[in-house]
Image (cartoon, rainbow, N blue to C red):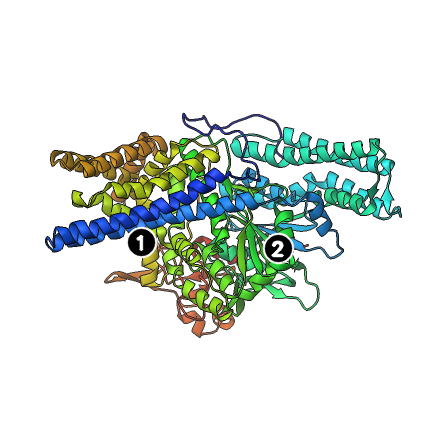
Amino acid sequence: MASGTARTEPRRQWGADRRVRPLPPVSAPVSDTMITLGRLGIVVTIAAWAAYLVATIVTQLVNRGFQGMQFISETVGYVVIVSFLTLSSLLYLLARQGALYRTRAHRRVPRAVIDAAFGADQLPTMTALIPSYREEHRTIRTTLLSAALQEYPYLRVVLLLDDPPRPAPGEHADMLAAARALPGELMEWLAEPRERFGAALDRFETSGAGDTCGPEQIRGLADEFSWAANWLRERADAESVRDHVDTFFADQVLRALADDFGRTHEALWEAAAEGAALSRGRVQQLYRRLAWTFRAEITWFERKLYASLSHEANKAMNLNSYIGLMGRSFDPVKTKAGLVLAPAANTGSIVIPDADFLLTLDADSILLPEYCLRLVHLMMQPENHRLAVAQTPYSAFPGSSTRMERLAGATTDLQHIVHQGMSYHAATFWVGANAVIRKRALDDIVEIDYFGGHAIRRYVQDRTVIEDTESSLDLGIHGWWLLNYPERLSYSATPPDFGSLAIQRRRWANGGLLILPKMRQEARERAKRGEHGSAAQTMLRINYMASTCWSSIGLLFLLVYPFNSRLLSPLVVLAALPYFLAMSSDLRRCGYKRTDVLRIYGFNLILLPVNLAGVCKSLQQAVTGKKIPFARTPKVRNRTATPFLFAAAPWLLIGYSVWAFLRDFHDHNWGNAAFEGLNALAAAYAVAAFMGVGNSLVDIALGALERLYVTDAPKESQVVRRRRSSIVVEPAPPSWNEVLYRGAPATQNGAYLDGDGAFRILAAPPAAPPAHNRRASDRSVVKAQEQAEAEAAPERPEPAAGSR
């Protein structure tokens, strides 16, 4: 286990995050002045846009007359672009205003009230699901512990390993072995306090004390809290701190929980010194709190060990595979197709307990200790019986060592404000990094397909790579609603370099357009139930799913097309001014600098090709009907190389902006020249500060070299013929046992079973991506190459994989 206090944090860059402590969980109520200024900003934006619209139409088209089709087209196009960009600004202000209202109205529920709510004999159960794909050991460890220390009555933490289960010896094999062993290590790590406080709770509940507890019993309880606080502080001091995330876990999870227990110890000791008496119920609640904090069960599960589960390469199906097994028991059965989970008539060797609530948590996220308790308490209120998902949109870890991570974290913290405001207007979307989900709601939206005779259950849709967004609409169609809890209780890692950030943001930009039509179905279903949403709710949801598309395309046209300078107006600047002023104010409230609003502008300029690539992927899927592969964000300590296009595009943008500036300056188009000069300076600063000039040039060179060299395909025993642009593979005849096991028709489509029972696909050329079964009745992806190893039957069942 981790020990020692040596720091190996990367060298801090100039301009890195200087914040030491995170923002408080509960924001301070905003002033009346801020509320008034927010309203004024909305009014000014609308008024300036309307004035510009009237002035442009009247001045350019009516007074000046129609001056040719080109000018009319430019005018209409420019007005449309400005209108859409202004709409995004207006919706940010609208969501921000809703967040301000919620901040002022929110009052934190006292801890004693929450403890009393969980004092009944029937307590809700929870299973925390943490999907993981080749994550670092320390990253998974902090996430698992932050989930396990949730002070929740009945909590089961499951690490859903999605690595290929039989990697070649080397780094990946070592990472998988460490991940499999980690739950057992953490259970041992928690063994001492779990046994101590479990025994203390049993002694108290069987002591037969009266209705009240006197000073002696209170002092005994205080001593238990003192022991827990000291134990947590010792573990925090023993943590290996290598970066700001490790510091956050040690300080905000272990030491914060220790301080909470320490203050409870002091309060109990003072009560005993004054001769006070506490009710037996309250003392029992405090004993239960100690026992619940350390008694979580931690285990792991690997879906790729079983041929009866989906092996599609995305986080949604990793979650779905486990959720579909909950509440049942199974016996592993070895077949020619691999190891399958056969439903057991009685109690099987693998038992997957059901739960009232699910916690989904990314493997690079950390929860504060009261996250689950407070969100489930909210969902248990009678008026919230149709609340399906409660979450606190994640914030960025403070103290990042790179400028890139700091500014990406600033945009993350701004999104926290936006999501809080969306809940004010009933426009909440599930953000998949962390959430508490009512299991009954997922049962309402499940879709069942069959593949190879096995039921494949989809609770979370995987049609797009933003599965949480589409599932939000599915829940709304079935009469459920979602809510962002107005506190900061969750934190997640931000990519530290531009290469990994580009992968993440391209995934985020992909899929919104495909999901947008489902809003009509949700609106029809809500209308049938007599529920009518507001215009603000509709526009905020459309903006959430489609603004990346129209903002990226609109900004691209403004950058590359030389619009007539007569279309420029101070009213356009006035319409955008409240947006930038509000954002600078929000950055200051989140612990950043007001001037970071200018850095974010340059940051968005170099992200423009990334967002456009995501939009193009959505259009590609809409045209072809083929799902876009899920691209996981790399979580490594070394820098991730930026793809050639994303590394070269910012330089092209800078070059074009400089050329356009010189052209407009020569032609005395001062407005266009100022705009182009601002873009050139902002993009140049962003390349130097966030990508790094040397790193971006290296990535461009590597990308160019990759396009010059073509590796020879490995030799295969099959005969491959090229016809036009397709590849036809002629497989060898199937053996007799393949024909008898799968049936003659199944062996004629290019699929066969090799000697160890692994399922192979011969319909794909060498070095190609895994082939897909396109039949309408079989929606699951049939894995080839390395994932075929996952379907080979192991010699014996893995008892730790989901067994209790």
- Count of marks, rendered view: 2
Q: Which mark is residue 379?
A: 2
242 or 590: nearer the viewer: 590
Query: N-terminal of the two: label 2 or label 1?
Result: 2
Q: Quadrant of residue 233?
A: top right
Q: Residue at x 70, y 43 (%)?
A: 294
The quadrant of the rendering that contains the N terminus is top right
Measured as percent of width and height from the top left, residue 411 is found at: 42, 40
Mark 1 highlights which residue? 616
Measured as percent of width and height from the top left, residue 289 is found at: 73, 44
Measured as percent of width and height from the top left, residue 571 is found at: 27, 43
Give the vertical position of 506 relative to 443 (above or below). above
Q: Which mark is residue 605?
A: none
Discs 2/1, front: 2
Element carrying mark 1? helix
433 or 693: nearer the viewer: 433
Give the vertical position of 600 relative to 352 (above or below). above
Position of 148 with respect to 589 (left or right) is right
Q: Is residue 440 visible?
A: yes
Q: Residue at x 43, y 29 (%)?
A: 16
Position of 799 with respect to 139 (left or right) is right
Amino acid carrying mark 2 in the image: Met
Q: Quadrant of residue 248?
A: top right
Q: Residue at x 26, y 50 (%)?
A: 81
Measured as percent of width and height from the top left, residue 94 is found at: 42, 48
Amino acid carrying mark 1 in the image: Cys
346 or 84: nearer the viewer: 84
Other-residue count near label 1 (Cα within 10 Å), few / some / many at <14 / 14–19 / ≥20: some
